[in-house]
Image (tube, rainbow, N blue to C red):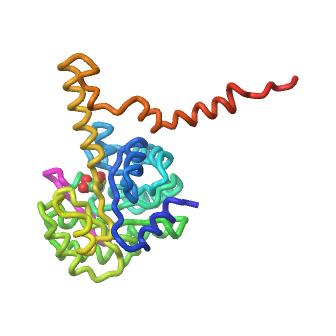
Amino acid sequence: MNGGAAALRGLLERNGPIVVTGAHNALSAKLVGEAGFDAVWASGFEISASFTVPDADILTMAESLAVTRTMVSATKVPIIADCDAGYGNAINVIRTVRQYEAAGVAGICLEDNAFPKRCSFYDGRRDLATAEEHAAKIRAAKSVQQSPDFVVIARTEAMIAGQGVDEALRRARAYADAGADMCLIHSKIKDAGEVMAFAQQWDRPTPLVCVPTTYGQTSVDELYAGGYKMVIFANHALRSAVKAMQDALFELRLLGSISAIDHRLVPLTEIYRLVDEAQLREQEREFVLGAAPVSA
Ligand code: SPV
Ligand code: MG
């Protein structure tokens, strides 16, 4: 049984917004859970950056899956995996769903970028799959999931590609009708105008998801009131970590003494807590130090 999927279904049935935050490894996923977010977004942008490669289907499915597995084991909070365009066509999607569901994620997101995808915010080339092709991927995904609770989010990049709200509506309707559990409507303009206009015209029961990276002044409550059930803060664990590390490392190099940057650090005991060092000592007492002698 996939406890994460059942928990995510519970959140979908509950009133109020589902607030999700991105992570890129086990530790950041654990911190997202401890901060009280409802779910972890296993972000392609964050995981790619943690390998210092662009978010453009450079990492393989196996690499991203391996990272995602470490997240599942680090937190009880449901994990939603960003599976980009599904790592190929509908046949690749079938294996992607099987592997991610078996890894214990609560759900996956599949976007209608053509494979290989490019991050929604990069300038330059942007090719979308046809609506028909992506709807078939959603149907393929839904046809192979094992647990009825597993959540498939269909994402349209129509507005990212400059094709407007009407094209986003046409595509999202096709994905909802293909069986998507949620539709993610992405936008890169500097206010919530596009996503709000979309939600006003949305005429399916399928709940909506948004990623307010470029319209960060709009609150979760406003987005929920506008029709968005799930809000994903996609990359903020990564960006805050990079800033903290850059500032601390720069100052350490400049000042040459650890005590000068003490105020920037968590104590070692906080790291011990995060890795459950107390449990290690308990297990050592029980299974190593106090091991009963084996009779000959
Ligand atoms: C990610 O975090 O990888 C996403 C969200 O897909 S975005 O970067 O906004 O496209
Ligand atoms: Mg992504």
The main secondary structure of the magenta stretch is loop
Task: State the residue lying farthest toward the right.
Answer: 296
Numbered-mark total: 0
Work out whether 279 lies above or below 118. Answer: above
Residue at point 63% right, 34% down? 283
Q: Quadrant of residue 15?
A: bottom left
Residue 197 magenta: no
Q: Which of 10 and 116 is in front in this view?
A: 10
Residue at point 26% right, 65% down? 220
- Is 138 situated left or right of 161 in this image? right
Q: x, y (%) of residue 145? A: 51, 65
Work out whether 195 lies above or below 106. Answer: below
- Which span is picked out in magenta? 121-133
Locate the C terminus and report the quarter of the image it occupies: top right
Q: x, y (%) of residue 132? A: 31, 72
Residue at point 16% right, 57% down? 214
Residue at point 24% right, 29% down? 248
Q: x, y (%) of residue 223? A: 24, 69
Q: x, y (%) of residue 91? A: 43, 60
